[in-house]
């Protein structure tokens, strides 16, 4: 068990491609950190630098109190679960689990004891004699996990470990990984591009984009107060609706020409207005109302998604349960003021404290025409 | 494999006919001829042949020259296969570590394969020529007197090098492909598991390369047994004193130079049997162990 400290870590590949642009991160002991972002955002590179599989171009990586920049992966006391599991195909499950222990010259009976214990935890005891090719995807995943926990390392590193599983198994393994990490209390860094996995697993979520950290925070914090339009559209499915606002005299204009009063918004500058699909109130609200043209209605069962246009931009509305709306319908929609997010044209969040204040004060006043 | 169903009984045979014809004309028929001829004794002028049963065979196995040739072949084949594979594997491991220059390196290493065996033999004959060659000159400086036309061991070394050299390119290509088929994450996992480079090579890389190695072992053995004829012919012609007279070369010498067609045919049949047995053994017993 250990803390991990990244200080201005950079990775520059030959040809001047900067994959990781100076990231600093403090990971507390026992914390479950999830690095999430689109492909090419540098999350895997960062993980591999912590593992020692990539050299660190600049900055320092500390595991516990030790700077590990120049230390071999084997000496860092970490274990990693790979996307393709990387099980040794010519070894049995038992040999796969014990390989790391044998390499470290551990005594036979202690190896046996540890392997049996790990196998019991992961319920893979009945196929210790099988080779990986005789296992199903889920079983292989468990063996890969077993190989990580059998060594009792200071840190677990996960590189998209669930992306090769089908949706049902993925959900199940997600819960198991979380429970396992809780009970072992081992500091973990988990890389994924799946925002659902990120939200459900993380104690602390790190959203990355283009080699930099966009936002760090607890999953719900990140969801409720995204620091940028990138985070807003990446976290949450379907993503947050974003409407560009152009400055127009005292107020703002939506792409289709609808005018909004400037009341409460930062004035005189273009901005981006965001709201989550589930925050939409059918019938409109006093803070914000628009006409919505339904183009497609997707019933998913417990909820329905309405895709369409409002204010000249594509909008998704999430409706609880079933919906009566049909393609071609025009619906009045609105969002409570407290649920509106304002971003600058650079994509960064702008605090708008007095929107919600105004909302509470003048509840009945119609804001829009 | 996909199973095709033909309504017409004749069509499948018709489609197979060209391949079967080639196999029959160029393989089965000559093989049968050799088999039949191995039971005959032909007079020196080719006018008359007599059926003598297994006498050609019994003579063969009583002939010290033949038994010597068997020993020479064993030493030669094992050495060629081991040398060609070991060198190729070393080069492939080196190439696998490079990222940018691997392409150039691979291209250069493939060139020898395009050289005809006879040319390769001649090339090495020049390099090792006691009068004008570079290697004997260099060896002379360290006090080794190189003359492969007099020294049987040196002669053997020469043909082994010449024969293995050509095969290295071929093996190299397969080893490189085999190495690149091993996922990088496998080696990374082993590195995290505390295996140093040496241990990774022996416990991960080589076992995962076993199917490739096995395939190459079969190919190299067959190559050393049969395809090395031009190398021997261009460098030593089986000499000195039968020191490099491998079985396939002896078949040619006895049959076409010595005109002892019966014995030569019997030798071919023996050689054929050896290869069949060897291949069956390799596939039956070794292949089972290399699968994972």
Image: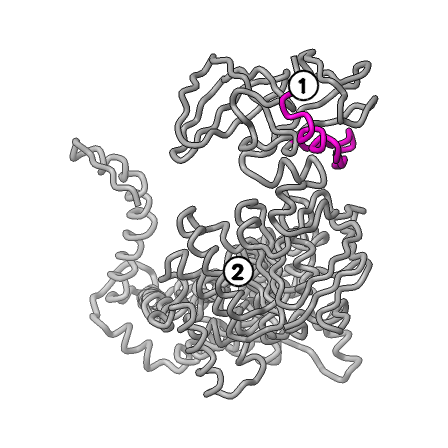
Instruction: Magenta stretch: give its range.
Output: A340-365
- Horizontal arrangement in the rendering, residue A84 relative to residue A190 (left or right): left
Residue A230 seen anywhere in this rendered image of the structure: yes
- Residue A307 place in picture, x, y as percent: 51, 23
On-image quarter of the C terminus of chain B: bottom left
Vertical placement of residue B26 versus A186, above or below: above
Label 2 resides on the chain identified as B
Question: Residue drawn at (37%, 72%), measured in percent from left and top?
Answer: A125
> Is residue B217 shown in magenta?
no
Depth order, front residue of B259/A326: A326
**Chain hosting mark 1:** A
**Compared to B64, does A284 lie above or below?**
above
Q: Which residue is mark 1?
A: A367
Quadrant showing the N terminus of chain B = top left
The disc placed on residue B230 is 2
Looking at the rendered image, the disc whose residue lies closer to the viewer, 1 or 2, is 1
Bin the neighbour count of mark 2 within 10 Å (Cα to Cα): few under 14, some 14-19, many 20 and up: some
Tell me which colouring the rendered structure shows. Answer: one colour
- Residue B206 visible? The answer is no
Q: Secondary structure at mark 2?
A: helix
Task: Quote the CA–CA distance across marks 1 and 2.
Answer: 96 Å
Total tally of numbered discs in the picture = 2
Q: Does A354 lie within the magenta span? A: yes
Percent of width and height locating residue B15: 27, 35
Q: Secondary structure at mark 1?
A: loop
Name the residue nearer the viewer: B269 or B98.
Answer: B98
């Amino acid at each position: 068990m250990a803390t991990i400290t990244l200080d201005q870590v950079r990775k520059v590949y030959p040809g001047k491609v900067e994959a990781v642009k100076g990231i600093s991160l403090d990971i507390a002991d026992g914390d479950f950190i999830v690095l999430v972002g689109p492909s090419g955002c540098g999350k895997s590179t960062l993980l591999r630098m912590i593992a020692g599989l990539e050299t660190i171009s600049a900055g320092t990586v500390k595991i516990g109190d030790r700077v590990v920049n120049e230390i071999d992966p084997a000496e860092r006391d970490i274990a990693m679960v790979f996307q393709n599991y990387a099980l040794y195909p010519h070894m049995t499950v038992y040999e796969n689990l014990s390989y790391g222990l044998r390499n470290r010259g551990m005594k036979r009976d202690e190896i046996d004891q540890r392997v049996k214990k790990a196998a019991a935890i992961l319920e893979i005891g009945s196929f210790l004699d099988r080779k990986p090719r005789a296992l199903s995807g889920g079983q292989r995943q468990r063996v890969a996990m077993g190989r990580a926990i059998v060594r009792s390392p200071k840190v677990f590193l996960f590189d998209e470990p669930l992306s090769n599983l089908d949706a049902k198994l993925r959900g199940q393994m997600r819960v198991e990984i979380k429970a396992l990490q809780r009970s072992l209390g081992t500091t973990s860094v988990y890389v994924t591009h799946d925002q659902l996995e990120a939200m459900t697993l993380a104690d602390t979520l790190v959203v990355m984009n283009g080699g930099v950290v966009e936002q760090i925070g607890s999953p719900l914090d990140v969801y409720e107060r995204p620091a940028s339009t990138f985070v807003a559209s990446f976290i949450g499915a379907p993503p947050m609706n974003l409407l560009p606002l152009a400055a127009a005299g005292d107020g703002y204009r939506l792409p289709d020409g609808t005018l909004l009063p400037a009341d409460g918004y930062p004035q005189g500058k273009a901005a981006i207005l965001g709201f989550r699909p589930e925050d939409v109130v059918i019938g409109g609200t006093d803070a914000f109302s628009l006409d919505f043209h339904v183009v497609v209605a997707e019933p998913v069962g417990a909820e329905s998604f309405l895709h369409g246009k409002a204010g000249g931009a594509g909008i998704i509305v999430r409706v609880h349960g079933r919906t009566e709306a049909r393609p071609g319908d025009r619906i009045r929609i609105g969002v409570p003021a407290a649920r509106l997010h304002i971003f600058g044209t650079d994509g960064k969040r702008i605090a708008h404290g007095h929107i919600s204040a105004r909302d509470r004060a003048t509840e009945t006043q119609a804001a829009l025409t | 494999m996909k199973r095709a169903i033909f309504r017409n009984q004749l069509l499948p045979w018709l489609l197979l006919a060209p391949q079967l014809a080639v196999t029959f004309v160029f393989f089965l028929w000559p093989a049968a001829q050799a088999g039949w001829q191995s039971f005959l004794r032909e007079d020196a002028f080719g006018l008359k042949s007599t059926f003598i049963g297994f006498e050609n065979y019994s003579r063969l196995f009583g002939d010290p020259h033949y038994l010597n040739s068997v020993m020479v072949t064993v030493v030669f084949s094992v050495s060629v296969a081991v040398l060609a594979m070991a060198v190729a594997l070393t080069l492939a491991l080196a190439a696998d570590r490079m990222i940018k220059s691997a392409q150039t390196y691979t291209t250069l290493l493939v060139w020898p394969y395009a050289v005809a065996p006879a040319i390769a033999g001649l090339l090495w004959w020049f390099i090792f020529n006691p009068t004008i060659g570079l290697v004997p000159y260099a060896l002379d400086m360290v006090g080794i007197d190189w003359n492969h036309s007099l020294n049987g061991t040196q002669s053997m070394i020469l043909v082994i090098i010449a024969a293995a050299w050509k095969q290295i390119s071929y093996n190299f290509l397969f080893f490189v492909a085999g190495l690149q088929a091993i996922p990088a994450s496998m080696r990374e996992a082993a590195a995290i598991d505390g295996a140093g480079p040496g241990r990774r090579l022996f416990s991960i890389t080589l076992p995962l390369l076993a199917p490739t190695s096995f395939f190459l072992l079969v190919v190299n053995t067959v190559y050393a047994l049969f395809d090395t004829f031009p190398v021997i012919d261009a460098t030593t012609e089986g000499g000195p004193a039968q020191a490099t007279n491998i079985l396939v070369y002896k078949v040619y010498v006895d049959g076409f130079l010595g005109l002892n067609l019966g014995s030569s045919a019997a030798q071919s049949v023996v050689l054929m049997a050896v290869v069949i047995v060897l291949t069956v053994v390799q596939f039956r017993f070794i292949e089972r162990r290399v699968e994972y």
